Image (tube, helix red, strand yellow):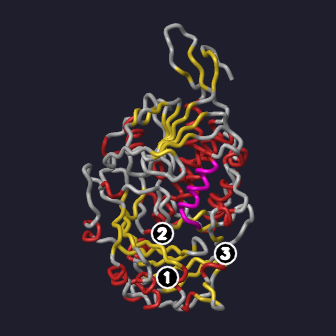
Amino acid sequence: MMTKGTGHERPLDIVILGGGIAGLATAVALRQRTPHHVTVLERAALQGCSNHSRRTVEDDGAPPSETQHLDTDYGIALAPNGSYILGLLGMKDHARELRGIQLNYWALRPASDEEVPASQFPTDPLAPAIFCSRGALIRWLIKAATDESLPGTPVTIESGLGSLKIDIRSAKAGSKSGDLLILADGLTKTGRAAVLANQGLPPEHWEDAYITAPQVAYMGLLPVSALSKHSHLLMDGKLQLQPNGTLMNWTWDPADEEGNVEEDPMRRAAKQQRLILYPISKEHVQLFAYLPSTPELLARFQRGARGGRAAFIRNVSSEEAAHHFAAFAPNVRELLTACPKLDLAQIRDAPTLASWHSNDARAVIIGDAAHAALPHTGQGSSQALEDADALSHLLRPLRAATSTCPEESEILVPQLAAALKTFDSVRLPRAHLTQRIARLFNGCIDPAELQQMDCFDFEEYNVRVMSYRGVEAHLAQNPA
């Protein structure tokens, strides 16, 4: 729609920094729903994309060894709200297309491994809960973004770029500039800091990009063949986890053994150890083993040039991990030693923000850069997909135009600021809710946040979050 003072209209040029789930999903949604021209820039290498050999020091100060191919596999969960968005983007058979496993049951057991009947997870054919590898979802998104046989203008993806400088005022990353810069480069990278600095927040708000939770986690993939001797996970000679889509969760609560059942629930949650196992394909299961952090454990995560600690310690000893979980039954503890490779990860999230876009509406952060959450609700990927759905819908009607004023030659994007404001109003409440619930489960929620959740109802939360059916339905039910 033409506005006074504007000349010829054209689709937007959009630059997305970050080729993870949030960035690629947004590129796919923009391709399918808008005429805009989209370029995705990724510092690591992505298979099947144009790669560049340049490498620079990690901009979060982590050691260079932390640079990884983004399609390195580990398990992720897609909650019903996220898988529904993938359905809107063209995914018809989630488990088949992602080579994943649908969640049908979950089993909560004590560390002693006393058998407890599994609970059934409600299923919706249009929005199944899916376990899969991150790499499988990345590959699906790359194909949906770039395949020339699909409708819409194919997305340009450039990967292997190393760290890129960001200029918010010109919506520029590296040498690429556009009408809008979408920053999906993760929690500890430059995008979040650049937007918060543009908003005028003091350095203490953006130099410390994350909050470290009071827990760390060992994580690894187990081949299904390695579980053949674990009879407690078998049913009729077949792996119960995989054919039935069962999530196993073992918990050790020291307060139970100490008889301190009156201890504050928050403190109890922070002290608990949990071992979680779920299938991500016919060949592999994902293991996460959470335990309270200690200064000694945190000190092992290397600091980089800018002071930030590495997110992972690679290839840690399985015997070390098993030692930390001595309170668990031997057959459960053996799952750790059965992992061919284990990493130790910091558990951290992002402080909530009042807005995700720059003051001049030239840039916006999404995904972990905006709302990284602790893993205890399984909503990280799904919230990134909600970002993609909402942002693409709100940018669909926008066009860029050259000013007709003789003294001005700038490109104008009428209503861009209004669209990003609406994006904030739709997405912030939902993303912040999942962040707070995860902190509650982890025992590290701020007392002020906890007070706001005095009447929290878990069933109501599940309905509110998991039954979400996209931004169009949300706006129809909640008109501005």
Task: Judge by depth and name the residue closer to the eye, 16 or 453.
Answer: 16
Position in image of residue 295 (x %, y %): 26, 69
**Residue type (three-letter) at the residue carrying disc 2:** Phe
Which residue is drawn at the image coordinates 59% and 89% (left, top)? 234
Q: Taking 236 as reference, is 27 above or below it? A: above
Task: Judge by depth and name the residue closer to the eye, 460 or 347.
Answer: 347
Which residue is drawn at the image coordinates 33% and 66% (left, top)? 313
- Residue 137 appears in which quarter of the rendering? bottom right
Q: Taking 108 as reference, is 175 above or below it? A: above
* 1 or 2: tag closer to the N-terminus: 1
Position in image of residue 131 (x %, y %): 59, 68
Outermost residue, top direction? 406
Image quarter in which the N terminus is found: top right
Question: Is residue 147 left or right of 417 when viewed as pictured?
Answer: right
* C-alpha separation, residue under disc 3 versus residue under disc 2: 22 Å
Q: Based on the picture, tell me whether residue 135 belongs to the magenta stretch.
A: yes
Instruction: Residue 355: tell me if it is visible.
Output: no
Which residue lies under the disc numbered 2?
A: 441
Which region is colored magenta? 132-144
Which residue is drawn at the image coordinates 30% and 58% (left, top)? 309
Magenta segment, prevailing SS (helix, strand or loop): helix
Which residue lies under the disc numbered 3?
A: 104
Question: Is residue 132 left or right of 348 when viewed as pictured?
Answer: right
Which residue lies under the disc numbered 1?
A: 250
* 3 or 2: tag closer to the N-terminus: 3
Q: Regarding mark 2 in the picture, which secondary structure is present there?
A: helix
* C-alpha separation, residue under disc 1 versus residue under disc 2: 15 Å
